[in-house]
Amino acid sequence: MALVSVGGHDTLSAISSFVRRYGLGHLTNLPDVDSYLARTLGISYHPRWLLIRADEDASEERGSGAIPDSIVTDALTPG
């Protein structure tokens, strides 16, 4: 599983400051300054999360706020 943080709806400087302020430097952080990725994925506000499974049907789950532990556990469980 890969966890990627995407910052958007703001300037590159503001996104970088957010990453530093909240200690998110250990994650892969992608700036989405022009909100292209957010629009493509249907994300209109933050914080949002999107889990795209790498199974044959590439199922998705979406939510807001923190990702529930049950979703993470399920995503990490083989099978």
Image (cartoon, rainbow, N blue to C red):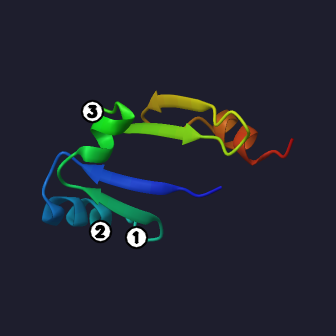
* Closer to us: 70 or 2: 2
User: Outermost residue, right direction?
Assistant: 79
Is there a contact, CB below 8 Å, between mark 3 and mark 1? no
Q: Is residue 7 above or below residue 43?
A: below
- Say what amino acid the circle numbered 2 marks: Arg
Is there a contact, CB below 8 Å, between mark 3 and mark 2? no
**Residue displayed at 23% across by 66% down:** 16
Is there a contact, CB below 8 Å, between mark 1 and mark 2? yes
Q: Which residue is mark 3?
A: 45
Q: Kindly report which numbered mark, 3 or 1, lies closer to the viewer in this rendering.
A: 3
**Residue displayed at 32% across by 46% down:** 37
Residue 20: numbered disc:
2
- Say what amino acid the circle numbered 1 marks: Gly
* Closer to us: 79 or 77: 79
Q: Which residue is mark 1?
A: 25
Q: Quadrant of residue 41?
A: top left
Label 3: state its secondary structure: loop
Q: Position of residue 23 (x, y in %)?
A: 38, 66
Q: Position of residue 10 (x, y in %)?
A: 15, 51
